[in-house]
Amino acid sequence: MVKIIKLVILCLIISKASVSKEISCKENPGCENFPEIIKFEGIKFPLTMVQKDQGKKPTAENYYIFHFKPLKDEPSPYIIIIPTSGGITKSAAVTFERYKNKFLDKGFGVIILDQFYNTGIERGTLSQGPLASMGALSTIEYIKQNYPNLSNDKFGIMGGSRGGMTVLSLASPLARENFIYKNVKHWFDAGVAFYPSCGKQELTMPVVVFIGELDEWVSATNCKMWKKRDKEQISSGMLKIFIYKNAHHAFNRELIKELYRPTKDDHDLPGRAVQYNKKADKHSQKKMIEFFIKHLK
């Protein structure tokens, strides 16, 4: 119970620290190379005892995705990309486009989840609408039900900042024990978390973490401590953590060339730095692709 409470508190802290006022991907000029957005119904939420007594039926939220099929018409692993709490901004869209092209070239299918488009979820909060994790898990079922011939039944997930925290939460046994995920049939097989909030935890799937030493949004120190204290999962290959010198938050966003500190006009926690770092970006991209090939191919 203590672990669950700590996880909930941590999620709320990261959520509040990552609010953005950017528009959704569908309205964003950075998404012009994306296909038409697809609406589908996700996994049904289980009923509580009170809801059962009231005679209610299980419900499911609608989700919106961009589906990039594998280049070859054969069973392939899929990568699900989830956004930060700010949604798919122009800088995020450009980075996701680059990642998507690399994944397709390596024989993957790709889905980008736009969890803020037309869902009622407020950016940076979990107060309304479905959880990002349920949306990500629902994309697995979407592929398995609609494109079974394109899937090899291996699925990876990648996210940054609040999305990175979602990756880590989905890699925790606490998620699988949570009643809300009772109807989930298939979980992810590997996860990549860019600049998440680190904390020592048991993992249910292989995970790699990338974070900058100068990150002001989340603590690189916590990732260092996790790496130092979790020798068993590190040595087994279940966990890898890369910490980049002279790198800030959002170091893989190539459009953010100059160091930028959001003001109170575009962020509820202004002043924290973001900036691109080419060396960290190129290295993390290479290691990410190698990681997914190893665990999903």
Image: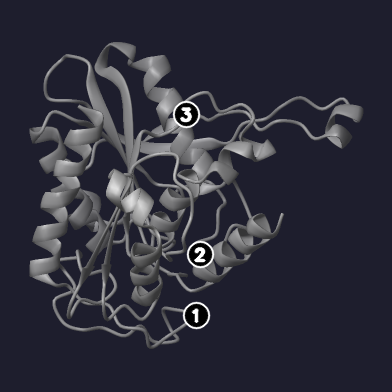
Q: Specify which label sits upstream in the sequence, 2 or 1.
A: 2
The residue depicted at 30 percent of the width and 83 percent of the height is 273
**Numbered disc 1: secondary structure:** loop
Q: Which mark is residue 280?
A: none
Residue 80 in percent (x, y) is at 33, 39
Near mark 1 (Cα within 10 A), the count class, few <14, some 14-19 or many ≥20, is: some
Q: In front: 280, or 121?
A: 280
Mark 2: which amino acid? Gly
Residue 107 % position (x, y): 13, 28
From the image, tell me which residue sits under label 1.
268
Q: Position of residue 68 (x, y in %)?
A: 23, 32
Helix, strand or loop status at disc 3:
strand
Q: Are marks 2 and 1 in contact (CB under 8 Å)?
A: yes
Name the image quarter holding the C terminus. Answer: top left
- Would you name the residue on which mark 2 appears? 124
Instruction: Estimate how packed mark 2 is, as few (under 14), some (14 to 19) or many (20 or more) residues with alpha carbons within 10 Å.
Output: many
Disc 3 or disc 2, which is closer to the eye?
A: 2
Asked whether the viewer can see residue 102, the reply is: yes
Q: Quadrant of the N terminus?
A: bottom right
Give the camera-side residue of 287 and 85.
287
Residue 33 seen in render = no
Nearer-the-camera pick, 136 or 55: 136
Q: Which residue lies under the disc numbered 3? A: 40
Sequence-first disc among 3 and 1: 3
The image quarter in which residue 237 lies: top left
